[in-house]
Image: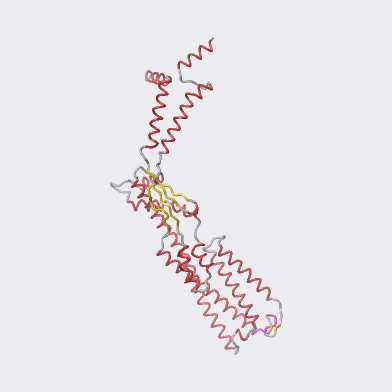
Amino acid sequence: MTQRVRKTVLWVRNARNRRLTYGILALISAVLILFPRPYLARAKIVPQDTSATAASTTSLLGALGSSNQGIGSLLTGGRPPSDLYLIIGRSDSVAQDVIKTLNWVGPGRRFDSYRDAKLFLDRNVDVHLLLGGVMEVETKLYDPDDAEKITAAYSAALSRQLATFGRQIIQNKQKIVQDRFRGAAARVSRAEVALDSFRREHNLAEPEQQLSGALVQRATLEAQLQAKQVELQTMSQFRGPESNELQSLRSDIAGLRAQIARTANPATSPAGPNVAGLTALSLRYLELFRDLKFQQSIYDIYQRSAEQVEVEELASESASYIQVIDPAYIDPHRQVNVWAIALFAMLMLLALFTEWYAPTTGLFTLDADREKRRVLEYAE
């Protein structure tokens, strides 16, 4: 064993042997950079682009009294950020869907366990974001057909996971809106019965005739303010704090409060007194009328919201959750083996260090003849 080690040391100390070895290894690693040839499969997709759906349903929802801005906020403003799409694309559920689709795991199949299959996908498949929220799926393998098939399976799995995610959001919206809508309908009925009973009991005219125009306007404004506040609380449950729709609601609430403040000063006009000059009977009548207006405003809000959620649900059932920019294809550019480039660079650094840097700086030398000359020069 000692003799073999000694021969190895002598062989390494021979500069010709070392440099020949460096050259052979560098040549091999240079060839491995290009061969075997890797193939890169790509697919570019845009997750859940609902702008076309919003444009097609604007005319329908506009008949319900909903503005175009509200519709756009519902169908496109509530989209999660692109980072969330990236998290879904790299999630374990997408990987499992791909493995099941390709039927990889099982006796006599490509992998023996899901763990091996997931490790293979982690090594060879990359999902990342491009400009404009575009997601790109890349698979790099030595078999072009296999790479293209895996990339296509990833795109399909991502679409299915986004559909599941979208359905969860819609179901949450639907549950909230339907519960509130049923309660609003019942409250409107009770408010109408209470106002009509009070009017018949005291032989009063319709509120618009019995009360002055200023009071009716104030009652309407107060009812709208309360309705907007309830709508703000409801929207806060499935909208983020930076949502444009929430900002618009806060602006509407501030405007209604300003209008109510301008009508709060006591005054008497030819049409009748304001709140300060009302009797107890008129105050009660005004309170019932204001409550009816409030309940009707809430009912209208939830009616529009329910129709919007229904349309969104129908759109989610028929529309794809991804728009395909480029289906899975093989990149025509020549790909290289990155690991071979790293090996080549490491050999070049090692050769530079042992053949030039270390002898020049006096750190060490592997050349036996050079070492002998140095000893003789030092002795002289």
Compared with 234, 134 (above or below) is above
User: How does the figure colour the protein chain or chains?
Assistant: secondary structure
Q: How many marks?
A: 0
Q: Residue furthest front?
A: 332
Q: Residue at x 42, y 38 (%)?
A: 338
Q: Is residue 228 left or right of residue 303?
A: right
Residue 47, horizontal then vertical, whole percent? 45, 57
Compared with 72, 327 (above or below) is above
Is 55 included in the stretch rendered in magenta?
no
Residue 1, horizontal then vertical, whole percent? 37, 20
The reply to whether residue 331 is in sight is yes
Q: Quadrant of residue 159?
A: bottom left
Give the position of the C terminus as an image quadrant.
top right
Residue 105, horizontal then vertical, whole percent? 32, 49
Residue 29, horizontal then vertical, whole percent? 40, 33
* Magenta-highlighted residues: 276-281
Q: Is residue 329 left or right of residue 218?
A: left
- Most foreground residue, 200 or 264: 264
Is 279 included in the stretch rendered in magenta?
yes
Q: Main secondary structure of the magenta part?
A: helix
Q: Residue furthest top?
A: 380
The reply to whether residue 178 is in sight is no
Q: Residue at x 48, y 16 (%)?
A: 371
Q: Is residue 150 left or right of residue 293?
A: left
